Amino acid sequence: MRFPRRRIDTDEIQEHWQPRLYARLLLLILVVAYAIAFVLENRHRVSVHFVVATARVSFVWVLLLALGVGLLGGILLAQLERRRRRRAQ
């Protein structure tokens, strides 16, 4: 069974061209590739010394934990600052 060949309409392609969509898709691919490379480069194990204990974990988890704690601390400080400004008014 043969299917008829459809001619490509260049006007149709130009009408549906969405450069912002493709730029976002490219950016997403680059971020995912960077995240994979980040994990692969930081997968060696390190010792983390707490006050009463020591643990050996992958370095990437230490970095992500520090990022999460810093992000959470920044959000909490911003909320405290907003509350302080409201009381001052």
Image (spheres, rainbow, N blue to C red):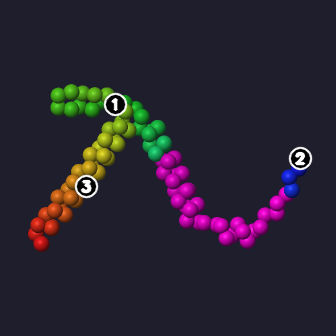
| Amino acid at the residue labelled 2 | Met
In this rendering, the label closer to the viewer, 3 or 2: 2
Numbered badge on residue 1: 2
Q: Residues within 10 Å of mark 2 (few under 14, many from 20)?
A: few
Please state which of residues 4 and 30 is positioned toward the viewer in this rendering.
Answer: 4
Numbered badge on residue 66: none
| Amino acid at the residue labelled 3 | Ile
| Mark 3 or mark 1: whose residue is earlier in sequence | 1
Q: Marks 1 and 2, Cα distance to the nearest angstrom?
A: 60 Å
The residue to which callout 3 is attached is 75
Q: Which residues are magenta?
A: 5-34
| Mark 1 or mark 2: whose residue is earlier in sequence | 2
The residue to which callout 1 is attached is 57
Q: Position of residue 17 (x, y in %)?
A: 64, 66
Q: Position of residue 45 (x, y in %)?
A: 37, 30
| Amino acid at the residue labelled 1 | Val
Q: Marks 3 and 1, Cα distance to the nearest angstrom?
A: 27 Å
| Label 1 element class | strand
| Mark 3 or mark 2: whose residue is earlier in sequence | 2
Please give the name of the residue rendered at 75% of the width and 68% of the height, measured from the top-left corner.
10
> Which of the 4 image quadrants contains residue 84?
bottom left
Could you tell me which quadrant the C terminus lies in?
A: bottom left
| Label 2 element class | loop
Residue reaching furthest to the left: 88
Residue 25 lies, with reference to residue 68, above or below; the image says: below
Does residue 49 appear left or right of residue 40 in this picture?
left
| Label 3 element class | helix
